[in-house]
Structures are given as C-alpha cells and as structure tokens.
Image: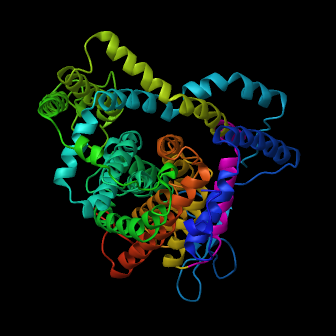
Amino acid sequence: MAGHSPANGSSGSGPRGVLNMVERIGNRLPDPAILFMMGAALVMLCSAIAAWGGMSVQPKKLVVRTEAIVDAAGTPVIDPESGQPQVREVFDASGEPVLDLVANGDAITPRNLLSADGLYYAISSMVDNFVNFPPLGIVLVGVLGIGIAERTGFIGAALKAVMLVVPKRLLTPAMVFLGIMSSLGTDAGYVVLPPVAAALYKSVGRSPLAGIAAVFAGVAAGFNANLLITSLDPLLAGLTSQAGQTIDVNYRLEPTANWFFMIVSTVVISLTGWLVSDLFVEKRLRLRAPDDGGPSPVSSEELAAQRMDAVEQKGLVAGTITIVLATLVFVLFTLVPGGPFDDSLGKMGATPGLVRGADHFDRWIESIVPMLFILFILPGVVHGVIVGKLRSGKDLAALMVDTMAYMAPIIVLAFFAAQFIEYFKYSNLDKMLAHWGGQQLAASGLGAMPLMVAFILVTAVFNLFVGSMSAKYAMFAPIFVPMFMLVGISPALTQAAYRIGDSVSNVITPLNSYLIIILVVMQKYAPRAGMGTLIAMMMPYTIVFGIVWTLMLLIWMWTGTPLGPGGALEYVPPAH
C-alpha cells in the first residue's frame, strides 16, 4: 500500500519494487467509478475528434493474387461456360501463393458522441445501459444467495470441513484449479469463489488477498482452460466456422477442436498459478499488516471457533443434504426428456425431439445463476434454522437486506462502467481499432509461430479495451481466421491462440466487469486497497501465464499434435 515504509517492502528495484510502484500509482488514481465516468467522457471526445478528422478504417481481407490467362497472342482466354476471362493464382519463386490485402465491405467510420444524435444516444440510453449491463443481474442474484449462506454460518461451517480435508500446502493449487473449472458455470466463479477463498486463507493464518488472487487467477486468467467442454466451446466454434466459410463455404469447426489443448492447459495453468502465488504474490503480501490484507496469526479464540460443535455439524449435514437433493432435481430437469432444462429443446418455443448436441446448451446455461442462487440459499436457510439464526421470515428478509447493502459499491460502479462500455461500442472505435490492428498483423509477413505469438499479444492488449470475450472474437474472427487460413494456419489454431490472449489479461483489464466484485471483496480485508492494489497483485499472473501458455502452444505446434478432435494445426486452402 502507498505509505508503507521500505522495511515493509514498498520500495526496491526488483520485481517487488516495480509492483509496489504500480500499486502506489494505481491507488492514487480516482475512485474506479470516477475513472469509468472519465473514460466515458474521453470516449465521447475521441469519437468527436475521429469524426471531425474524417478518420475511417477500411475492412480488408487476404486473398490469393490472380492474373488473367492469355493465349500466345496475348488475348485473354474466355471461359465458355461463364463467358468471363479465365484467371489463375500467382505463386512466388518458392511456390507459395502471393497474397494481397483487398477491401472487404464498407469503410468503418466513427460515430460522434458529441453530435446531436450522439448526445441523444448518450443521455437516452443511460437507463438501458445500466439495466442491461450483463454482470449486474448475475452479481446481484448470485450474491443474494451467497449472502444468506454466509450470514447463517453455512459457508463458515463448510470452510471448517474443507480445512480438515485439503492439506494447507495444496490449498493454492486447489484454489487455482477450482477457479479454472468454474468456467463450467460461465461467469459464476467470479461471484462465488473470491469471498470463500479469502475467508479460507484468513482462517489458516494466510493473507486473505492471496486467496483472492489465486482463485481470481484461475477464474479469469485461466478462463479458457477446462477439463471438459463448456459453453464457450460451441460459441467460439460457431464464430470460427462462420469466419472460415469466407474461404471455404463448407468449412465447419467442431466444438471439440481445442479440447486436448485445453485439458493440458488446465494442468499447466494450475501448476503455474501455484508457482506464481508462492514465488511472487503471497511472498509480497506477507509483508503487509493485517489491516492491509496481510496475514494475521490465528488466535486461540479463532482456533476454537474453527472447531464445529454438535449443532453446527447437524446444520452442515442438513445443508449438504439439501444441496445434493436440489442438484439431483436440476439434473433430472436436464436429463428427463421434455424437462425444464432438456438441452434438446433449445430455447423457448423450439421444437421438442431435436438431437442433443453442442448447439443446444441454451436452457442449461441461461439457468446457471438462478440455480446457484437456489443451491446457496436453500442450505443457508436450512442451516440457519437448525443453528437458531433464522427464527422467522423477518430474519431471512433482514439478512437479504444486509447482503444488498454490501452490494451498494458494485451497483454504483456498474452504472458508470456500463456507460463507458456502451459508449465505446456505439462510437465504432472498438471496431476501428480491431480492424486496423488485424491489418497490421496480416501485412507483417511473419511465419506461423511468430504470427501466433503476435496474435496472442494483440488479443491480450485489445482485451484491455474490449472486455467481452464473445464480442471481441466476433470482431476478430472475420479478420484473422480467413487471413491465417490463407497462409496455412488452421482456424482451430487461431482459436486456441485467441483463447490464450483473451484469458491472460482478464485479471488486469479495467473493462473486466467483474473486477469491481473482486475489489469490493478485497476492501473487506484491506479497506485502503484500490485498483492499483488489485492490478499490482494480479500482474505477475498475466506475465507468467502469458509466457508459459504461449510457449506451450509453440511446443504444441512444433510437435504437430492435433489440438483436439477435428483440431488440425495446418490448413490447406481449397483449389480454385
């Protein structure tokens, strides 16, 4: 924290000193809500400057250069069927096709947010931007359930049980791995895991911020890894297939195309997260005072509190049984034909009886957060009744009100974050930046391995400006997938590289909408912590994960191993 003495590790010339400098500078910035307000104003100004300056970006694509076929007299040869001159591809001296960047569609121009129409949009959309801010509903619903489970003591009792099962030495890799696997529940891991990890670390005398860092690294920086196929895979594969059809109209990428790579990534990133936590993050946090998020010795009273009495044990058992029963009900909802979550039904109104497949996750995925709410609030209520913390409906309502009061900073911050993100989209500056960056990379003339490294870096940097994984890939896929296909790089490889770049900088980008949740949880243990504290704490994960994951991809390319079923590394353009 700013204000620490050199003896407490706040200065120095090594990595720790650099991180402390980042923290001091970051914490001197205005409150995050004010930063987003300033960001929205800056976007408005930049959109006006870009519009007044007549700036535009022409979308382009790589195509194989062609030339007219002529006869001995130099006359173009006409195709008898089409009546058009015949053409052939042009190859260089090494036999490789010559590629050209050509215009693809209309030029993208900025939309001026300081014009009459722009100002009307900025003012009239404020409520909709806030209400439709994707993380807002997820956070409020998820935390409402967690708050009841926490305040009735169910989560505390569960943590005591976890401490008896998980060795202290393996706590960090367990947290990172759990964070990675949480992507099975889309973004729910951001809401559920950080407060649990912080409480668990504090209960064993370790820095609660270290617990937050480990689990946040898994949830966000390891977001695209998993042992199983998740909802991300069909989403990305669909966008990749659509982009690949620019080159080959019959192209289709299977959702399993990156599966082998993601399985190995889960193991590698879990171990790397353990290493980063031990060597950099927790070592630095040990120097902090307890009121700055550092470790505090576990007192005899706290040790006594960690032992469950008979009533707590009874409440924990009953709450656990409640979770199991509720989970079984949700499983039946999914597996029973015609059930509420039957994947084969797709979205509301879809025709029953469709074949199950990767394209039919709609009902399950859209119900994840409400299911988590139920899976937390039911055992919380059962535990609360048994231990005597809930004696009436008024007690339950009071706990819910207390939980929502805890969410007030997040609600305020979400309002301004939503305006900034939506203004940025409206201005078209995000699309202009994406297309310009893509064209620079396509024109670089790099080989396959350098191209993948450069693409990972470009994605990681743009993730600082466009936080949504799907929105960013919806812009990137039509640019990069066809371009890389024409130089022999498979769409599966492009997609895998994108997933690396999109993940590693998630923990430091202010445009990660869930960063505000992490910050609020941190401030429970370190009231003076700010955005600088969070970024400095997470930056080692971004750097090391980026290096390790990129090296892993390069080794994978060198060995020629498929990325997954249907995930070849190379692509051969179809003959014309």
Q: Is residue 343 above or below residue 100?
A: above
- Frontmost residue, 376 versus 1: 1
Question: Furthest residue to the front?
Answer: 300
The answer to whether one can see residue 162 in this image is: yes
Q: Quadrant of the N terminus?
A: bottom right
Locate residue 90, reporting x and y percent: 59, 77
Say left or right for 438 vs 484. right
Magenta run includes residue 444: yes
Residue at the (40%, 39%) spot, across then down = 191
| Residue 537 image point, x, y percent | 51, 59
Residue 89 % position (x, y): 57, 73
Question: Coloured how?
Answer: rainbow
Q: Main secondary structure of the magenta part?
A: helix
Q: Quadrant of residue 93?
A: bottom right
- Location of residue 342 with respect to 86 vertically, above or below: above
Is 325 included in the stretch rendered in magenta? no
What stretch of residues is rendered in magenta? 422-446
**Please, which residue is most extreme toward the bottom here?**
93
- The residue located at (69%, 59%) in the rendering is 436
Front residue of 465 and 91: 465
- Residue 435 in view here: no
Q: Is residue 121 left or right of residue 49?
A: left
| Quarter location, residue 109 | top right
Q: Residue at x 14, y 31 (%)?
A: 328
Q: Residue 58's x, y, as percent?
A: 72, 54
| Residue at (60, 64) in percent of width and height | 20
Residue lying at the far right in this picture: please name it. Answer: 52
How many numbered marks does the figure carry? Answer: 0
Q: Pick whichever, 260 or 345, lies toward us.
A: 260
